[in-house]
Image (cartoon, helix red, strand yellow):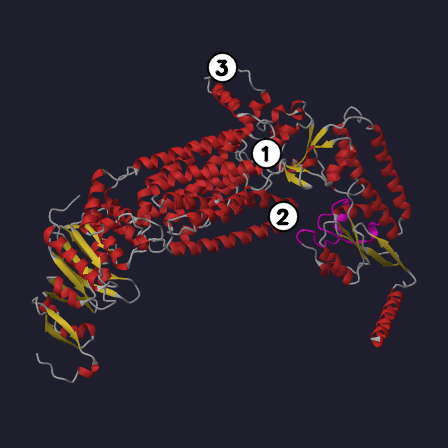
């Protein structure tokens, strides 16, 4: 069963792991086709929000809906046909090839004893092409570098042909070139294929550069929600991250960029 | 890729057939393979000429040898398939079918049965195999219940619970033995069970267990694609749309059922469920859609050969089959590891 | 160098002297050699005897020494009086050394399968231990003679052994020159495809031979081993003896085993359950009864 639109609504959701950490009354509405960056310090619940959005965790209060349909009413299989998740790290103890891993993305569509169809193979090839992994298709996943592996995991998620793509810190542990590669790809998917993207981001500057809307989590709730200018301010960063920063402007794009202030520079007046 | 898969499965099936015929022809009474073919065809009403063989050969083949050889086929296939299921689900190439308590449960059931002065025959199965079967299943259920918390049964908890239950049951087995009468003979019997040996005497046993094993393997095949998905972790599998807790339970159930069937026919035969899936993965890759049927067929052939050697090498005595599976399997596996180009990363 | 040789000589002389000294027995002590070659030393006739196996108990009682037996193992049940004597444990899983010592025995009669540790322990506590390990009926007769000597019951021993020897001779002469049929002795057939049978070196194997039979299990590796169905069918025994009656194995169940219908013993109905396995399994005075029973089963035409 598919929804008419693909809006994602995390409606007044609360969740607790039972060890003191809790998310309270989180409200997040992502309209179809938006690209949202989810920010927040470690432990603020970014991963938890993504898991709630994917239906893998059930909120104790509130509800998560896709296109107006509550995830509780959908089979896991149906959810996976619309929402794909790119986790932070993937550990595979067996020697699967890149192509085999990407093919796993078709799992929600495979039936019973039947293997993959021609269409499944085509989708896999298309995704490998899109992510620049064609030449890696017969290499073993475990032999690739961190950046390459991350691309494969992204490719696997894309093979699900999702309307909503959730990513958990897709750029951490990567070299700058790979980080840019992934983010450019996400932007392309969002612009050309209208895929809704929600990505938990570690790097505030990259988030500001690539995401039109930023949602900042802090202290168990949504602390700020808006454009990069609205969210990345000195006061907000100080409050949520407990860090003293200077805000500058990116030389080419019109977005704020954080500049760190080490202790020895704190007493010098800024030109801004 | 698809054609290549079919060829391998076909080849393994042919190998199995050849190995079965070979094993059926060897024993204290030699029955040449062409004679076997004639007798089989005659049995199915195709061949009407009744000369060419002796009554003794027919009697031995149909009443004694074939049930045993088919028993080896079933045990080998069941253990290998269970091995694939557990290794895939637990994401651990070192897992074997006994890992979550089936072995100790079976030993417990079997020892209890050996000590009871009851004589019971159910479709050809005595009290010991039935008790072993029930013990194996009961033990897994107990482990699952212990590990289950908040609707989930994490793999680590199951492994721990399995270890605890195993230790406990083994201790009880020891206690029961020390309190028993005719201790010398009991120890021999328990040891015999622990070392393993194909114990299929009646056709009824084959008739009862064959459908269970075959259905179990087919059911496992339905989960082949999902087992591939499980290899990225339970969380990743959930993202791919798999109802993790439900399928985990089902897959464990199928694996345990197959293992229980195997112990009721052969005692605790080690090595097969660990090494065959491993070896097949090294040779054919980790895709479960090929790995499952290939392991079942290869495991069956392997055990038929092991059983053949077990009953002929030191004739008239028998070598416990568990000893043979280790002696043959270990060097062969070592060879595979060295020649293999597929790497393991863990 | 000369000094060293001198001291070495002194040392040797001392050692010889010491060993010579220690070999002088005390006036009333006597020595015997038991079945495993150990030297047993006793001071006087034993008055308080502990028996560590059922067969030993039977021997002691048969020699009229029932009153001197102060302790027996848990499984001693013949004659009936033996059951009321203090129990001291058994070979499996363990004997209770404390109980044995508390009975203040001056002789312990052990059996071949008793662990050497117990023998050593009892010896070190000052209790002489004689180990009996008969391999066949002659061994039992010799053991009875030995016990008779140790306990002073020499005339009772003579009477018993003579009677046993006579019966043995009768059996031997009756079967002289007769062909030995093939006999299968089944210890445990609860797994009908792989029954446990008597093998070479077992007491039962020796009995079968004495009774004029040929043990089909004699080609096996140990005294008790599993012979698979096919091998049994191939061996084609003419007589099957069931020593597993108490496990529920019946003549009918044996006849129904797959493939066994072609065995001669099954065709002729020559399947005999042993109702009292103590007659044939216990290497004691009643072993002659067991032998005669066996001879009847194997050669019914010669014995009644």
Report which quarter residue A13 is drawn in.
bottom left
- The circle on residue C192 is 1
Q: CA distance from mark 2 to mark 3?
A: 55 Å
Residue corresponding to mark 2 = B180
Q: Residues within 10 Å of mark 3 (few under 14, many from 20)?
A: few
Q: Residues within 10 Å of mark 2 (few under 14, many from 20)?
A: some
The magenta stretch spans residue C90:
yes
Residue B33 position, x and y percent, is 52, 25
Pointers 2 and 1 within a single chain: no
Instruction: Point out the residue furthest to the top here.
Output: B49
Please, is residue A167 above or below residue B71 in the view? below
Callouts 3 and 1 close, C-beta under 8 Å: no
Q: Nearer the viewer, mark 2 or mark 1?
A: 1
Callouts 2 and 1 close, C-beta under 8 Å: no
Q: CA distance from mark 3 to mark 1?
A: 33 Å
Residue corresponding to mark 3 = B48
């Amino acid at each position: 069963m598919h929804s008419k639109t693909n809006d994602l609504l995390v409606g007044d959701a609360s969740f607790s792991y039972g060890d003191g950490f809790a998310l309270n009354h989180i409200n997040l509405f992502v309209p179809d086709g938006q690209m949202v960056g989810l920010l927040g310090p470690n432990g603020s619940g970014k991963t938890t929000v993504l898991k709630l959005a994917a239906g893998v965790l059930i909120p104790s209060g509130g509800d998560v809906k896709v296109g107006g349909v509550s995830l509780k009413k959908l089979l896991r299989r149906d959810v996976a046909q619309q929402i794909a998740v790119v986790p932070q790290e993937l550990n595979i103890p067996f020697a699967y090839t890149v192509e085999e891993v990407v093919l796993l993305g078709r799992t929600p569509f495979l039936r019973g004893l039947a293997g993959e169809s021609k269409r499944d193979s085509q989708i896999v090839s298309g995704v490998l092409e899109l992510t620049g992994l064609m030449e890696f298709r017969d290499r073993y996943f475990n032999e690739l570098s961190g950046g390459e592996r991350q691309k494969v995991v992204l490719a696997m998620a894309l093979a699900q042909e999702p309307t909503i793509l959730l990513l958990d810190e897709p750029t951490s542990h990567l070299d700058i070139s790979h980080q840019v590669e992934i983010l450019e790809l996400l932007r392309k998917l969002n612009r050309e294929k209208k895929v809704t993207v929600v990505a938990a981001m570690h790097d505030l500057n990259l988030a500001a550069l690539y995401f039109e809307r930023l949602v900042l989590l802090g202290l168990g709730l949504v602390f700020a929600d808006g454009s990069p200018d609205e969210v990345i301010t000195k006061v907000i960063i100080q409050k949520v991250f407990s860090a003293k920063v200077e805000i500058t402007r990116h030389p080419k794009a019109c977005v704020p960029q954080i500049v760190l202030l080490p202790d020895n520079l704190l007493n010098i007046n800024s030109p801004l | 890729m698809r054609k290549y898969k079919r060829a391998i499965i076909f080849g393994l099936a042919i190998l199995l057939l050849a190995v079965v015929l070979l094993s059926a022809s060897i024993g204290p009474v030699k029955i040449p393979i062409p004679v076997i073919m004639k007798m089989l065809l005659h049995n199915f009403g195709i061949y009407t000429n009744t000369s060419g063989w002796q009554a003794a050969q027919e009697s031995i083949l149909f009443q004694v040898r074939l049930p045993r050889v088919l028993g080896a086929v079933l045990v080998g296939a069941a253990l290998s398939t269970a091995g694939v299921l557990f290794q895939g689900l637990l994401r651990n190439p070192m897992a074997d079918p006994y890992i979550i308590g089936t072995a100790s449960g079976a030993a417990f059931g079997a020892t209890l049965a050996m000590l009871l002065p009851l004589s019971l025959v159910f479709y050809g199965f005595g009290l010991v195999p039935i008790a072993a079967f029930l013990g194996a299943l009961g033990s897994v259920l107990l482990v699952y219940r212990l590990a289950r918390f908040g609707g989930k049964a994490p793999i680590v908890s199951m492994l721990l619970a399995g270890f605890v239950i195993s230790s406990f049951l083994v201790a009880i087995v020891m206690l029961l033995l020390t309190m028993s009468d005719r201790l010398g003979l009991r120890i021999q019997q328990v040891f015999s069970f622990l070392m393993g040996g194909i114990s299929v005497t009646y056709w009824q046993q084959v008739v009862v267990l064959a459908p269970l094993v075959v259905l179990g393997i087919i059911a496992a095949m339905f989960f082949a694609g999902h087992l591939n998905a499980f290899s990225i972790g339970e969380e990743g599998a959930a993202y791919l749309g798999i109802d993790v807790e439900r399928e985990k339970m089902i897959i464990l159930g199928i694996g345990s059922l197959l293992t229980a069937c195997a112990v009721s026919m052969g005692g605790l035969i080690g090595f097969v469920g660990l090494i065959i899936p491993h070896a097949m993965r090294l040779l054919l890759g980790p895709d479960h859609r090929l790995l499952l049927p290939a392991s079942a067929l290869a495991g069956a052939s392997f055990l038929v050969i092991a059983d053949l050697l077990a009953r002929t090498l030191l004739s008239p005595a028998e070598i416990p089959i568990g000893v043979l599976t280790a002696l043959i399997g270990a060097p062969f596996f070592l060879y595979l590891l060295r020649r293999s180009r597929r790497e393991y990363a863990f | 160098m000369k000094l060293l040789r001198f001291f070495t000589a002194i040392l040797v002389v001392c050692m010889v002297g010491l060993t010579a000294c220690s070999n002088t027995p005390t006036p009333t002590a006597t020595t015997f050699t038991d079945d495993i070659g150990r030297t047993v030393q006793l001071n006087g006739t034993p008055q308080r005897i502990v028996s560590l196996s059922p067969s030993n108990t039977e021997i002691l009682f048969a020699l009229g020494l029932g009153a001197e037996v102060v302790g027996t193992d848990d499984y001693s049940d013949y004659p009936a009086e033996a059951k009321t004597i203090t129990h001291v444990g058994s070979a499996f899983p363990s004997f209770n050394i404390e109980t044995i010592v508390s009975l203040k025995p001056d002789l312990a009669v052990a059996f071949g399968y008793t662990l050497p540790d117990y023998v050593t322990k009892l010896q070190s506590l000052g209790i002489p231990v004689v180990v009996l390990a008969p391999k066949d009926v002659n061994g039992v007769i010799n053991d009875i003679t030995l016990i008779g000597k140790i306990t002073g019951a020499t005339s009772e021993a003579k009477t018993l052994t003579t009677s046993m020897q006579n019966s043995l001779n009768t059996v031997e002469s009756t079967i002289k020159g007769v062909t030995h049929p093939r006999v299968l002795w089944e210890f445990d057939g609860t797994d009908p495809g792989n029954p446990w049978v008597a093998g070479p070196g077992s007491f039962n194997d020796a009995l079968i031979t004495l009774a004029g039979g040929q043990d089909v299990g004699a080609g096996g590796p140990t005294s008790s081993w599993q012979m698979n169905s096919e091998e049994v069918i191939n061996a084609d025994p003419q007589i099957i003896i069931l020593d597993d009656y108490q496990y529920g194995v019946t003549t009918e169940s044996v006849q129904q085993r797959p493939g066994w219908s072609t065995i001669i013993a099954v065709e002729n109905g020559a399947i005999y359950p042993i109702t009292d396995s103590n007659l044939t399994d216990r290497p004691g005075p009643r072993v002659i009864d067991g032998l005669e029973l066996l001879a009847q089963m194997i050669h019914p035409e010669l014995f009644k």
